[in-house]
Amino acid sequence: MINENTRYDPKHCGLYKPGHKTHFVQCNVMRDKKRYPAEVELVSPYSVRVKTEVQDEILYYHDAVNLVLKCTVAVDDDIAFSPEAQLLYVKTDGPEEGIKGAWFPAYLSKDELIMCDEVDRDSGYFQVRGHEGQ
């Protein structure tokens, strides 16, 4: 479990578990699940309150502060949550001014988080520091 005394590094997190990174396959599989307009509030560095017309709950994410900042600057205030998929979608800016970007998907957890790790031993995927994106 993560707490205030735990050192964590979400930028180098390699876990594809609830509350951590979102895998593109998960996004593809879950893309047709019902989404609801959402409001997001920061509760702690590791948790957010997500309110929609169908739920209002505290959920966990390894970089909640950055997630709330993304929500603050969402294009057209377009934020949606899929309770079934546990995915929060935030519309982001495009690469050039005036161009709308894509959805940033955050995989939220109903349970408290485990420590970020560079290796997701369950999936077999891992990152080598300094070699991301190669």
Image (cartoon, rainbow, N blue to C red):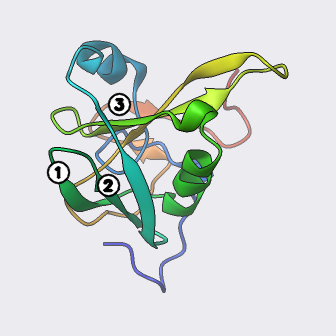
* Cα–Cα gap, marks 3 and 1: 34 Å
Inspect the image, locate mark 2, and give the three-letter code of the amino acid beneath it. Val
Element class at badge 1:
loop
Crowd rating for badge 1 (residues with CA inside 10 Å; few <14, some 14–19, many 20+): few
The quarter of the displayed image where residue 97 is located: top right
The quarter of the displayed image where residue 130 is located: top right
* In the image: residue 37, left or right of residue 132: left
Inspect the image, locate mark 3, and give the three-letter code of the amino acid beneath it. Gly
Between circles 3 and 2, the one closer to the viewer is 2
Q: Is residue 89 above or below residue 108?
A: above
Pointer 3: what residue?
124
Crowd rating for badge 3 (residues with CA inside 10 Å; few <14, some 14–19, many 20+): few
Q: Earlier in the sequence, mark 1 or mark 2?
A: 2
Q: Is residue 124 above or below residue 43?
A: above
Q: Position of residue 90 (x, y in %)?
A: 50, 35
Q: Position of residue 42 (x, y in %)?
A: 46, 67
The quarter of the displayed image where residue 1 is located: bottom left
State if disc 2 and disc 1 touch (CB < 8 Å): yes
> Residue farthest to the right?
97
Pointer 2: what residue?
50
Pointer 1: what residue?
55
Q: Is residue 104 above or below residue 27?
A: below
Q: Residue at x 47, y 42 (%)?
A: 14
Which of the pair 47/97 is nearer the observer? 97
Q: Position of residue 78 (x, y in %)?
A: 50, 33
Q: Residue at x 60, y 46 (%)?
A: 70
